[in-house]
Image (cartoon, helix red, strand yellow):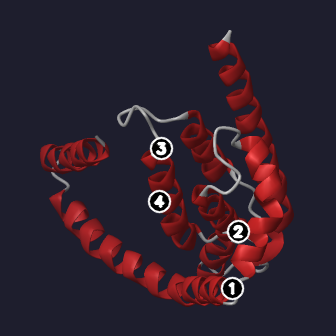
């Protein structure tokens, strides 16, 4: 569906530039857009590689497992339908740790594995379970302590203080997590009535 939407935007833009006689501007934007995109990738890549490497070191050193064991009791309260020893809880904890460091790209494999583990016990394979919905909310609005990707973007654009957004980022993600989990709880209770 997203590819249809983006394809429509592109088609509308091309048709509009032809109709208004601005094909030169379209060609110019295509060439500059690709160049700007590549510059942005090369400016952000070192920071993302660094933090992804730190996450891999933490995983190999067993720190993610220790974090997982530490937050497992809390996660079990958020995901009551999962067993305490369910491997999905470990992947969820690792996903949360990566997201807390603002590493969405490093968190993605853990999130996919968590969903895969939860899907194994899903009686309706075409419908998300309550645990899957809760995890999606937690993953989407999860608390970010160090927004490394945003800091990298700000650095690449020459920000005088790229890390000044840390406090506001923490507050915003705490609020989004609380709001999302509260709504999830309310809807889950309403569904059972």
Q: Residues within 10 Å of mark 1 (few under 14, many from 20)?
A: some
Q: Which residue is mark 4?
A: 112
Please name the residue that numbered disc 3 is placed on: 121
Q: Earlier in the sequence, mark 2 or mark 1?
A: 1
Give the residue number, with chain letter if any, for mark 1: 58
Check disc 1 and report its element: helix, strand or loop: helix
Which residue is pictured at 58% across the width and 57% down the height? 88
Residue 97: numbered disc: 2
Q: Is residue 87 left or right of residue 7?
A: right
- Sort mark 3 into few (<14), some (14-19) or many (20+) by Cα contacts within 10 Å: few
Labels 4 and 2 touching (C-beta < 8 A): no
Q: For the point 68% across and 14% down, which residue is it?
A: 190
Residue mark closest to the camera, 3 vs 2: 3
Disc 4: CA contacts within 10 A as few (<14), some (14-19) or many (>=20) = some
Name the residue rendered at 40%, 77% in the picture: 36
* 97 in relation to 134, above or below: below
């Amino acid at each position: 569906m997203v590819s249809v939407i983006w394809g429509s935007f592109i088609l509308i833009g091309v048709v509009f530039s032809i109709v208004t006689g601005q094909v030169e501007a379209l060609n110019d934007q295509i060439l500059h857009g690709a160049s700007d995109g590549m510059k942005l990738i090369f400016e952000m890549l070192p920071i993302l590689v660094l933090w992804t490497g730190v996450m891999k070191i933490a995983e190999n050193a067993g720190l993610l497992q220790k974090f997982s064991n530490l937050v497992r009791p809390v996660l079990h309260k958020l995901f009551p339908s999962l067993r305490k020893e369910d491997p999905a809880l470990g992947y969820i904890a690792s996903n949360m740790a990566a997201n807390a460091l603002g590493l969405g790209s490093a968190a993605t494999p853990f999130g996919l594995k968590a969903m895969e583990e939860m899907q194994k016990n899903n009686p309706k394979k075409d419908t998300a379970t309550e645990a899957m919905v809760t995890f999606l909310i937690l993953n989407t609005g999860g608390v970010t302590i160090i927004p490394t990707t945003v800091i990298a973007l700000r650095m690449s654009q020459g920000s005088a203080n790229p890390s000044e957004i840390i406090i506001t980022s923490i507050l915003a993600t705490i609020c989004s997590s609380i709001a999302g989990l509260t709504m999830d709880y309310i809807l889950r209770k309403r569904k059972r009535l």
